[in-house]
Image (spheres, rainbow, N blue to C red):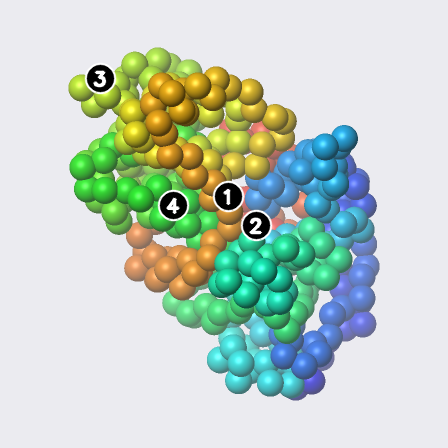
Amino acid sequence: MSSNHSLPNTMKSIICHGPEDYRLEEHDTPRPGPGEVVVKVQSVGICASDLKCYLGAPLFWGDENREGYCQAPVIPGHEFVGKVVALGEGAGEKYGLALGDHAISEQIVPCHTCRYCKRGQYWMCMPHDIYGFRQKTFGAMADYIRFPANALNYKVPDTIPVHHAVYIEPLACAIHAVQRANIELDHTVVIAGAGPLGLGMIAAARLKNPRLLIALDLNDDRLEVAKASGSDIGLNPARMDVIDEVRNLTEGYGCDVYIEATGHPAAVEQGLHMICKLGTFVEFSVMREPVTTDWTIIGDTKELNIHGAHLSPGCYPIAISILEKELLPMDSIVTHRLPLDSFQDGIDLVASGDRSIKVTLEP
């Protein structure tokens, strides 16, 4: 191990023991093996999926239909940026990293041996070791985090403030969702949800230059941030019939592309009625509960293209470039920067949703 930073034996960490059972505890500080990197965490985001894990969503804790994904006890946190403080043998050369660099790691650490990895589809890796949920990939809600040898790591330019760089992960996910939408120049695009992911989708969709880009959200303040991020129009479903309004804006046809980024079942139903025939519906959200809808709309009525979007393959360099170019109002997006000790306050802010957009912790 090479290092110019004396690593302590233990570190402050948030440990997920189960739903609504997250504790601030001491944990062994990680050390790098060959090809591994240890960074001092500078900022870590609290994602909507972190909240749903905290609240006990079946995806993470299982039910009669599935095994839970979360392997507690585990350190949460998959949105992060840090400073390189230790490099295992060969890691610096492999990743182009040096001590003192700001660095980030893609949220999934692929196995490189399963069918999906061998096909180049690493973001669907069968073991699916995502930071913050799995025993092999402890997350960044701690003083330090280790990037395993199979990780996909990137240097972050010093020109990007660390409290902006923490947004690279959700922005990269947003870019992938927009890529899945196959947006054309004459399209009307609706993005449901102007939270951290939706705002990133708006910025990415703006670069596709659609005919009309519409943001939907129940919070008028977020709709203002959406306009600053690139939307042409912001509509609040609590104030109007947004399905009728989108139809009025499109000569009765409906939108060509609908991207769902709210995580609420009602937004799925809304999108299916709002979208035009032969349109493309992209589903990104982690739903806390099952969604029931009329599938006839998808097939016999409209012949829709239904695309899922998961993680961010190949999108981290694009996200870094977007932040370098200052194409997003980051000081309006990162609304709260809290110390690690205040993690419960951060979770509560994300849960309420009315006073924050992106909440971060700074160990």
Q: Is residue 25 left or right of residue 51?
A: right
In front: 146, or 228? 146
- Reading the image, the residue beneath label 2 is 45
Question: Is residue 159 something that shows in the picture?
Answer: yes
- Reading the image, the residue beneath label 1 is 358
**How far apart, in angstroms, are the residues tagged by discs 2 and 4?**
24 Å
**Which element is circle 1 on?**
strand
First along the sequence among labels 2 and 3: 2
**How far apart, in angstroms, are the residues tagged by discs 3 and 4?**
25 Å
What kind of residue is marked 2?
Answer: Gly
Q: Residues within 10 Å of mark 2 (few under 14, many from 20)?
A: many
The nearer-to-camera label among 1 and 4 is 4
In front: 262, or 99? 262
Q: Is residue 179 above or below residue 271?
A: below
Occupied quadrant, residue 332: top left
Q: Residues within 10 Å of mark 4 (few under 14, many from 20)?
A: some
First along the sequence among labels 1 and 2: 2
What kind of residue is marked 1?
Answer: Lys
Q: Position of residue 302 (x, y in %)?
A: 34, 23
Q: Position of residue 347 (x, y in %)?
A: 64, 39
Q: Is residue 129 above or below residue 219?
A: below
| Numbered tag placed on residue 249 in the rendering | none
First along the sequence among labels 1 and 4: 4
Whether tag 1 and tag 2 are in contact, CB under 8 A, the answer is yes
**How far apart, in angstroms, are the residues tagged by discs 2 and 3?**
40 Å
